[in-house]
Each structure stands twice: as structure tokens, then as C-alpha cells.
Image: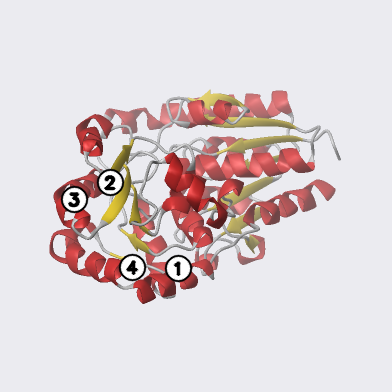
Amino acid sequence: MSNKKFILSGGGTGGHIYPAIAIANELKARFPESEILFVGASDKMEMQKVPQAGYKIIGLWITGIQRRLTLDNAMFPFKLISSLWKSRKIVKDFRPDVVIGTGGFASGPLLRAASAMGVPTVIQEQNSYPGITNKWLAEKAKRICVAYDGLERFFPKEKIVFTGNPVRQDILDVDNLRQDAIGAFGLDPNKKTLLVLGGSLGSRRINQLIAKELAWLLARDIQLIWQCGKFYFEEYRHYGDKENVKVLSFIDRMDFVYAAADVVISRSGASSVSELCIVGKPVLFIPSPNVAEDHQAKNARAIVDKGGALMLKEAQLDTQFQNVFGDLISNTEKQLRLGENIKKLAKVNATKDIVDEIEKLLKK
């Protein structure tokens, strides 16, 4: 079984890319002789992130459908046909044993072409509410690995396997890193640390909130690690001149920021939610309202309903942020309770369980 071939496709945001890389790393560990190829959208961040992780990637000319009438939408049928044609060629030339999709535009044509050519496909659905691509691919997939309950509403029940979402292996044991992390960021070991995460691309609304509330936050005797995103770094970097505030465009060592954090404010993309469950820190989720099907609010709600986190919608920030966050940061008992509850929802072996399912398909 050693010299197997796998194609992985997922991208657009870190939430689709990092799970695909995690699965690829586990496949490589299990089948050291295997060949692994990635397929992404040619102008998205996977074209940088995948080669950085040590894998080859081919780009497709594909974008999503916008919700309003745009030139991109008019071009969509041509891009889809072009991508299906190129995907067929990729599958024919590479001859994979299994093709795995983790969501994002490029996985649509690739998995569709692979299924049509008789190659078994696996979908990994990260969200509590599936996107358009995975719904389209579900009927032809052999396995659908999910991270939330209740997805038989959208997918054939007999194909669903509850695995959880793959996460970076380096965050599985952050508790022992606290001292190193505090030192690396030049923080005060005696102060509470707030970690602010806007997702892989950053969040305008969260950045506006932190800028507006910064004096109020610092008056609570806390320090901040603030990931503002590369698009917003120039606008917000000057806040990093203040004592007790570290402003970052992108985070390379997620294990360090999680280890340093006492409390987290975060978007609720599927990957972030899965990581935060494993890390087990108290979280205030601020879902992005700009994602398809309101995914992020549904992801956060699934945790909040089990007593594992707090949530504020963007529309509530101006009126309720100080009350909700002020109560959290001053209440150690509440912090401990939230941290314990969210940790109960963690799926630590998700990546291994997904690769187990891929292995079963190889044996068939």
C-alpha cells in the first residue's frame, strides 16, 4: 500500500487550507512513499501556503458565485467548464487512488471530475451548515467526514462519518508552552493576556471594535496580542507602539499565541472553532456576517448552546461589548467553566480518523 497517490483540494481561506495540509501530513506519515498533489484556485492564498508546507499545487481558473450581478458571475460558466476540463486532465495524468476535498471553489470541479472518472472521493465538511460546493459533491462522494451533528439533513446518512475537523498538531499541548510564549512576545507574566483573532484574512469589524475599546481594555489591567490581518496591518500597526499591545498581521506560531492567551476574542470559522475547543480557553465569538449561509453564527451557536463560549453578533457590539466582556474578564470562575466546557467538545483525533476512512477506501 506504500506507493499510493492522493490529490487534495481546498482553499480560499485558511479554514479550508489548513485542514487539507493536516490530512496531507497524516497521509505522508502513514504512507511515506505516497505521492501527494494539491489543486487550488489560482489566485487564492493556497498557492502560497501549500508550497510553504512542502507540497506541489496546481491552480484552477475558478471563483465562487457572487451574490450580486458581477462580471465574475457572467464568467462563471466559462471558468467552471475550463476548470472541469483541466481537472479531468490532472486526474488522468496523476492517476490518484483517492481524491479529498476540504471545501472552497476549486474542490468542486476537481472532485466532480474524479467521481466521473471512477476515482473514490472523500469530502471533509468543516461547518455545521454545508456550503454549496459540498452539497453539489455529496451524492457522488464515497465518504463525508463531518464535525457537527445533524448533517443528515443535507447529506446521505449512510456516507456520513463524525470525525471532527483536522487541526494543526502543534496546538495539541499548548499548556506547557506558556512561559516560552510569554517570553517570545515580550509580555508580562503577571498580567492576563487577551488574544484577538480575526481569521486568516483579518476582520475589519473586530479591528474597529478593539481600536475603539483599547483604552477601556487596558484599564482592566490586561495585555493584548491582536492579529489584525495583512489587509489592515498598516492601518492598525501604530497601536503596537503602546505598552501591553502586540499587533500582528499574521500569526506563524499559533501554538504560542494560544499558550499565551487567558481569554480569546475570535471569529467563528470552522477551523478556529475546532482549534479553540482543543486549546480550552474562554472565548467570546464574534461571527462574521459576510459568509455564505451565516456559517459562522451557526458554528458559534453550536458551542454556546453547550455552555462552551459566549457570542455577540456584530450588531450588538456597540451596546453590549463592555458588559459582556467586562463580566468575563473579571470573573475567573466563569473563565474556568467556559474553558472546561469548550474542551469537552474537542475532537483531538480528527485527522487520524479521517485518514482511517481514506485507508478503508484504499482497501476496497
Residue of label 4: 310
Q: Are marks 4 and 3 in contact (CB under 8 Å)?
A: no
Residue 226 drawn at (x, y percent): 31, 45
Q: In front: mark 4 or mark 3?
A: 3
Toward which corner of the image does residue 261 lie, by quadrant? bottom left
Give the Cα separation between the discs numbered 4 and 3: 20 Å
Q: Earlier in the sequence, mark 1 or mark 2?
A: 2
Left or right of 57 on screen, residue 288: left
Assess disc 4: are there few (<14), some (14-19) or many (≥20) residues with their C-alpha within 10 Å of its C-alpha.
many
The reply to whether dot 1 and dot 4 touch (C-beta < 8 Å) is no
Q: Is residue 37 above or below residue 31?
A: above
Q: Nearest the camera: 236 or 50?
A: 236
Q: Which mark is residue 244?
A: 2
345 or 165, which lies in front? 345
Question: Depth-wise, is mark 4 or mark 2 nearer the camera?
Answer: 2
How many neighbours does mark 1 have within 10 angstroms: few (below 14), some (14-19), or many (20 or more)? many
Q: Residue at x 29, y 69 (%)?
A: 328
Looking at the image, can residue 220 be seen?
A: yes
Kind of element beneath mark 2? loop
N-terminal-most mark, 4 or 3: 3
Q: Which structural element holds mark 1?
A: helix
Decide: is 150 above or below 164: below
User: Would you name the residue on which mark 1 appears?
Assistant: 339
Amino acid at dot 3: Leu
Is disc 3 placed on a helix, strand or loop?
helix
Instruction: Please tell me which of labels 1 and 3 falls first in the chain.
Output: 3
| Disc on res. 214 | 3
